[in-house]
Amino acid sequence: MHIKVLGAAAGGGFPQWNCRCDNCRRAREGDPAVRPRTQASLAVSADGERWVLLNASPDLPAQLRATPVLHPGDATGARGSPVKAVILSGGDIDCIAGLLSLREGHEFIVYAPPFVEKILHANQVFSVLDQNLVKFQKFTENSVVELRDVADEPLGLWLETFPVPGKIPLYQEQGRDLAELVNAHAVVGLRVRDGSGRTLLFVPGCAQATAAMVRSFEASDVLFFDGTLWRDDEMVEAGVGTKTGARMGHVSISGTDGSLAAFAGAKIGRKIYIHINNTNPILCDDSSEAETVRDNGWEIAWDGMEIII
């Protein structure tokens, strides 16, 4: 299985366009220890030729241009793309907005949970996706789907989804109480495996790393997990927001309830943090927090990172 990190940052990217935090300042100044990153997305392929996107971030056009294997290539006709499908894990803007950049006459399938498909069909702007070319395929939690292209050709990958504690999209929050905002079915995690049984887990948003979740992830070859914040009050302390990580539906990396502690000793091939907020010190390779992450057996995703399993 071929895996490419198209983007590793949380919503807004890094450096964020309107942020003056120390991390963003260092990134803008070209500090080699602080690499810029676009918003979180992966590309996955069983054969290195036909690719599936895991989420379609607002930065997708730039990500496609920066990734040669996703260029049109030598396909017949004036237009074409090796992107054959897009899988959506949630309805947040940073998961779905990139679909609008795939409207120029290309055939592909969108795999989405019912609650995300409902969001897309209810919003008129997504009607720019030509229904004669772009097909929608629902999936349900805990089901296994063989991924196929529009021509019904198998892509050599199987998708299984599972519920993840998380938060509903920001634009759906109005009038709802906290119990409705953060719940066990607000987002889904994605488990992708190939014909040899190699397994990728993609969980870019997660409100709590439970013991049951950690056990279910064991024996996987690669895990990309929510690395949004180092500490729960990070954005408040940085003066860039009023919400804690818990309020935003993101478990912290540090602390007794954080993901570092939860996954300690877990038997997973590679553990990689993704969806990293611009305030998170692990974005700075020379920070003590980044060193702690590495010392605990984790990696920190960066745009262009490539993994073959």
Image (cartoon, rainbow, N blue to C red):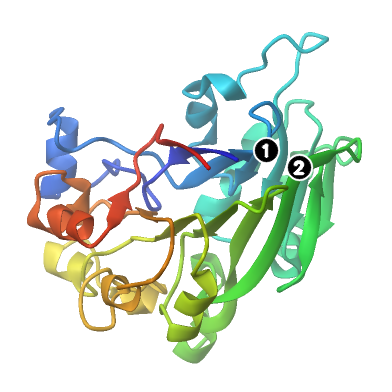
| Front-lying residue, 275 or 266 | 266
Image location (x, y in percent) of residue 289? 14, 58
Whether residue 175 is visible to the viewer of this picture, yes or no, is: no
Residue 293 horizontal side relative to residue 203, left or right: left
Would you say the residues marked 1 and 2 are in contact, meaning their CB atoms lie under 8 Å apart? yes
Query: Label 1 sits on what residue type?
Result: Ala
Q: Secondary structure at mark 1?
A: loop
Q: Which mark is residue 46?
A: 1
Q: Secondary structure at mark 2?
A: strand
Query: Going 20% across and 53% down the picture, which residue do you hit?
Result: 282
Residue 15 horizontal side relative to residue 186, left or right: left
Query: Going 58% across and 46% down the picture, which residue do you hit?
Result: 97
| Front-lying residue, 198 or 32 | 198
Give the CA separation, mark 1 to mark 2. 6 Å
Image location (x, y in percent) of residue 260? 27, 70
Q: Is residue 266 above or below residue 228?
A: below
Q: Is residue 68 above or below residue 232?
A: above
State which quadrant residue 249 falls in: bottom left
Query: Label 2 sits on what residue type?
Result: Gly
State which quadrant residue 8 falls in: top left
State which quadrant residue 272 falls in: bottom left
In primary-sequence order, the first of circles 1 and 2 is 1
Image location (x, y in percent) of residue 183? 53, 84
Residue 260 horizontal side relative to residue 138, left or right: left
Query: Going 49% across and 30% down the picture, which residue do you hit?
Result: 63
- Please give the residue where the numbered disc 2 appears in the rendered image: 156
